[in-house]
Amino acid sequence: MEASVIQPSFPVPKESSYFRDNPPPKPLDSHTKLAKVFVSYHLHSDRGVVLVTSGGTTVPLENQTVRFIDNFSAGTRGATSAEYFLEAGYAVIFLHRQFSLLPYSRHYSHSTNCFLDFMTEGQNGEVVVNPGYQQKMLGVLRKYNAARRENKLLILPFTTVTEYLWELREIATLMRPLGPKALFYLAAAVSDFFLPKDRISEHKIQSSENKEPMANGSSDAKTSGNAPPGQGKQLKIDLDPVPKFLKSLVDGWAPEGMIVSFKLETDPSLLVSKAQQALEKYSHHLVIGNLLSTRKYEVVFVAPGKEEHWIRVPVHRRIKSVTGARPDIKAMKDGQTTEQEWLRGE
Ligand code: PAZ
């Protein structure tokens, strides 16, 4: 099946109609309850509360979703930053793409090692941590346990862009009483486009030439196209623009909070100007720009009235990771994912 995406040319829908037309995710109520209890718990402490968003959102192409469009993000930035926020004394609400990296467990999940490689059999047939990993794992475990003991980490998942936006609006609104103690650190990679509820097919989009009606009774004209005889039909997806929620966040949902957004680009010549444009458009506090190819070791801070400021991991630290003798997580530094990613320059 060949897919071509036609970019929309009509006006961006308003926030209210987005929420009216795209229903909330099923777990929103339970997530809201958890977030409410969490925020109340920290409300009268000196502690800041940060909402860290992490991972990429999906745009489902079918209601019973077989295919979806995804946004790039492993969750490394978000999960790693969450750990640093916790160490700095913040309470963290970690709103992440389900199954992406999580604070603390990220050191052992999604790596080239199977988690069983971290274990070995003890003298009495018990499972113990491999001596080579003991020291680091103890450090990670202690930090993880401290965060749990002090009720400083709330982990909530999303998958689709609509789920993300519902969750963001709900949590931000709940965080309003925190005033300037609320920090928003928006590292998630959020789709700019979505397929509205009224145009999404219920069942799996068919690639054959049958002109069967869809289960909802409609024709599949929205997602079909002509094809040369004897070939599967093309898939044409007509996406709507996602409303610019950063504006709603800054002006309405979290007017007193500090808001840090991220900007990911692939063209180096666009990065700083796009970050500046975002700052001008939404009037928030900081945009952290990064390029897909170098995001592991350099970012640029763009803040109102300030010169752009680059932060780079020193070259010797990068080289150390890449040339680490053993292809396992011991050769990795905080904030990096797999050694293979480093070797690929990702
Ligand atoms: O999750 P990750 O570490 O693989 O990537 C992080 C990131 C590049 C998604 C993040 O730093 C970022 O730039 N987020 C915003 C993406 C955007 O412009 O939509």
Image: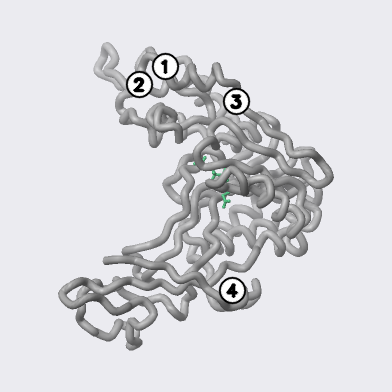
Mark 2 = which residue? Answer: 327
In the image, residue 186 above or below residue 172: above
Asked if ligand 1 lies within 8 A of label 2, the reply is no
The amino acid beneath tag 4 is Tyr
Q: Are marks 3 and 2 in contact (CB under 8 Å)?
A: no
**Mark 4 or mark 2, which is nearer to you?**
2
Q: Position of residue 284 (x, y in %)?
A: 76, 52
Label 3 CA crowd tier, 10 Å (few <14, some 14–19, many 20+): few
- Disc 3 from disc 4: Cα separation: 40 Å
* Residue type, numbered disc 3: Val
Q: Position of residue 74 (x, y in %)?
A: 46, 43
In this picture, residue 309 sits left or right of residue 33: right
The label nearer to you, 3 versus 4, is 3
Question: Under tag 4, what secondary structure?
Answer: helix
- Badge 4 residue CB within 8 Å of ligand 1: no
Tell whether label 2 touches label 4 (CB within 8 Å).
no
Q: Residue at x 34, y 66 (%)?
A: 3
Residue hosting label 4: 18
